[in-house]
Amino acid sequence: MPFDCSYLARHGANACLTACPTKADVGGFQFARVEQAGDLPPADSRVIDVAMLDMHHGWPNLGHEALVHVVQNAVCDLREPLLRAGLNVRVTSYDVRRGQALPEAPGDRHTIYLGTGGPGHLDPAVNDGGAGSQGIVEDPAWEARLFRLFDAIREDRRASLFAVCHTFGVMCRWLGVADAVLRGPEKGGKSVGVRHNVLSAEGKDHPWFKPFAHTLGLAARFPVLDNRLYDLIAHSPVPSDVKLLAVDCQGDGSPGDAVTMVEVAGDSSEGIPRMLGVNHHPEIVNRQRQLVLLEKKRLRGGVDEQWVAERMAALTEPVDADANDHLLHLTSSYTLMGPLRFALYRAIRLRSQAHGVDPGFHERDLPLVYDRDPATMTR
C-alpha cells in the first residue's frame, strides 16, 4: 500500500489536514469522544465504530491524533465501497484513565480496539504524582474493567486489539508476562527518538513477520520511534497463546532484555495478528505530517515547551543509512498499519454484505505492506 492514503500521496500532508475527502455525510469518517457516561453516541448499523482506548490521562500528545489519522487514511482509500454500501467509519475515543470510560465488549458496535500511549507508571495503583508517575495521580478502578475487556477480545475471534506504548505495558500486566522497570542511568534513562529493536526467534518464524525478517537480514534489527520511561522485563511462565516477538537492542546492537512486541491469540486463519502490542510508536511515522500537527499544537498554546522540543527532536532526528525512512515505514506497516487495515477492511466487507451490498473486494487481496513503488506492493 502507499503508506498513507492515495489522496495524501497526491496532494501532501497539508492538503489532507485542510480538505480531506473523508469529510462526507456518507462514505466518510467521523469522530466521537466519550469522557463520561452519557457521551456515547447511539449505535448505528450504518456506522462501523473503532474503539480508541485513550490512555493519556489528559496529557498533551501526538499519538492519539496520529492513530485517528491512521484509521482516517484507511477510510479514504475505501471511500467508494463505503459509499456504495451507505456506510461511515467512526473512531469513538474513550477517556479510560481520567474519565473511567471504557467501551463495551466485542459485539454489534465494536470489533476493533486501538490502545494509545500515555504517561506514568504502568500500574495505576502506584501513580502517586512522583517522578516515575510523571505527576499522574489516578483512580486505578479502570484497570480491572479493562482486563475484563481484554479477556473478551481474546475469546472473540472476530475482535482485534492493537496496542502501542502505555497500552502495550498494560497488556503485559494483564498477561502477567513482564514487569515494568524504570530505565536507569545505566540504560541512558528515558528512551527517546529513533532506536532499534530485534525480532525474536518466534518473531522471525511468524507467518506475518517472516517477510519483514527476510528484508531485515540476519540481524533482524529494525528501527522504531521510541518515547518510553519503562522497560518491560519478561518472566516465566508465558501463556501458550502468547508470543514474545521482539526485544530492544543494547548499545552494541545485540538483543537486550526488554520485551517490545507481543502477540496474543494468534488464531487468525490468515496469519495476521489480531491482538498485537508494541512498545514504540508506529503511528508516528509520517514525520512531515506530525511536524505540521506539532506546530499547530504549539501555536494553539497550552503545551509545555520542553514537551514540544522533545518531540521536535525525535521527529527531526537524522536516520542512519541502514535505518532510513523506508525501514521506519516498513516497521509501522508490519507492527501496526497492516494488521489494523486488514481488520478494518474485513469489518467494512462484512458490514457491506450484512446490508446486501457486494463490497467488491476481500481484505486478503488488498495490499497491506508499504512499498515505495506501487507496482511492487505486496501483502
Image (tube, rainbow, N blue to C red):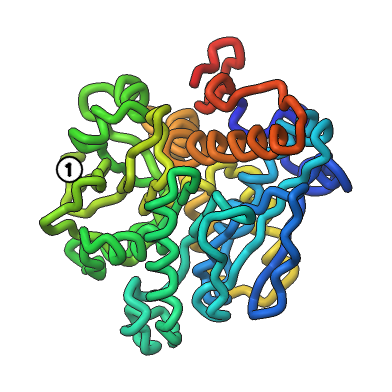
Q: Where residue 56 appears, x then y in whole percent?
A: 52, 70
Count neighbours of disc 1 (C-alpha within 10 A) and say few if under 14, some if 14 to 19, many if 20 or more. Answer: many
Which residue sits at x=43%, y=73%? 145
Quarter of the view holding residue 255: top left
Q: Where residue 373 appears, x then y in whole percent?
A: 58, 15
Q: Where residue 334 appears, x then y in whole percent?
A: 43, 34
In this view, which residue lies farthest toward the right?
25
The answer to which of 374 and 163 lies nearer the viewer is: 163
Which residue sits at x=88%, y=47%? 25
Which residue sits at x=31%, y=65%? 174
Q: Is residue 323 left or right of residue 294?
A: left
Q: Is residue 242 left or right of residue 228?
A: left
Q: Where residue 362 appears, x then y in whole percent?
A: 60, 24
Residue annotated with mark 1: 255
User: Image quadrant for the N terminus?
Assistant: top right
The answer to which of 20 and 87 lies nearer the viewer is: 87
In this view, which residue lies farthest toward the top?
375
The answer to which of 150 and 162 lies nearer the viewer is: 150
Q: Say what secondary structure mark 1 lies in.
A: strand
Which residue sits at x=57%, y=27%? 363
* Residue type of the residue flagged with mark 1: Pro
Quarter of the view holding residue 3: top right
Counting every numbered tag in the picture gives: 1
Q: Is residue 228 left or right of residue 41?
A: left
Q: Is residue 195 above or below residue 145?
A: above
